[in-house]
Image: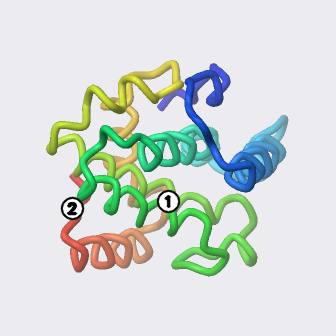
Amino acid sequence: MKAPETDALDAPGEIDGRLLGFYDRLRARVAGTTGKSGGGLRDSAAQALMLAPDVFILLVRLVLDREVPASSRRLIGGALFYFVLPIDLFPEAFTGPAGYLDDLVIACAVLGEAFGHELEHFTRRHWSGSARLGEVLGDVARTADSLLGADLAARVRRFLERRGVRIS
């Protein structure tokens, strides 16, 4: 899994300052965690965490893009809301930046679901990462168990399936 190397804010669009602030804080926390020593994280988890800020900003851009169908924006908005919740299945308040791994898995599953619904050209327009988004989504889905642990990954799958989203 290769982390994006470009600035996620290069794409055009109006983004609320609070969301940009969240993006900046998320990027700083992730960079601090995955710095020189990896913050005690496995390489795969550290690499996945580096994707979190860019996946977050992609969700923001898609929700704000009025050309994206409303039903897809609602689904993506739910993943965006989950990202900013302080308490979730793997709360950042207790686990630090590693707590964004469940947010990342959920966001990637939602984006994977949205890909099946004509959104590929939108994500190509808004994705800033250096890796192809389809590959990123596949990598995160394939490694969900190792990123989260089997028990938490199973909880995330059940959470998503109750909402009609499958981790592929």
Q: Compare marks 1 and 2 and give the one earlier in the sequence.
A: 1
> Where residue 98 sits: x, y (%)?
66, 60
Query: What type is the residue that disc 1 sits on?
Result: Leu
Q: Which residue is mark 2?
A: 166
52 left or right of 25 in image: left
* Foreground disc of the pair 1, 2: 1
Judging by the rendered image, the residue that carries numbered circle 1 is 80
Q: Which residue occupies 21% across, 62% down?
A: 166
Q: Position of residue 145 (x, y in %)?
A: 39, 60
Q: CA distance from mark 1 to mark 2?
A: 17 Å
The answer to whether mark 1 and mark 2 are in CB contact below 8 A is: no
Protein image colouring? rainbow
Residue occupying image coordinates x 25% and y 31%: 120
In the rendered image, the vertical position of residue 91 relative to residue 67, given as above or below: below
- The residue carrying pointer 1 sits among few (fewer than 14), some (14 to 19) or many (20 or more) residues within 10 Å by Cα, namely many
The residue that appears at 17% across and 37% down in the rendered structure is 118
Horizontal side of residue 138 vs 25, given as left or right: left
Q: Secondary structure at mark 1?
A: helix
The image shows residue 28 at horizontal and vertical percentages of 81, 44
Give the residue type at disc 2.
Arg
**Measuring 60% from the left and 38% from the top, which residue is drawn there?**
14
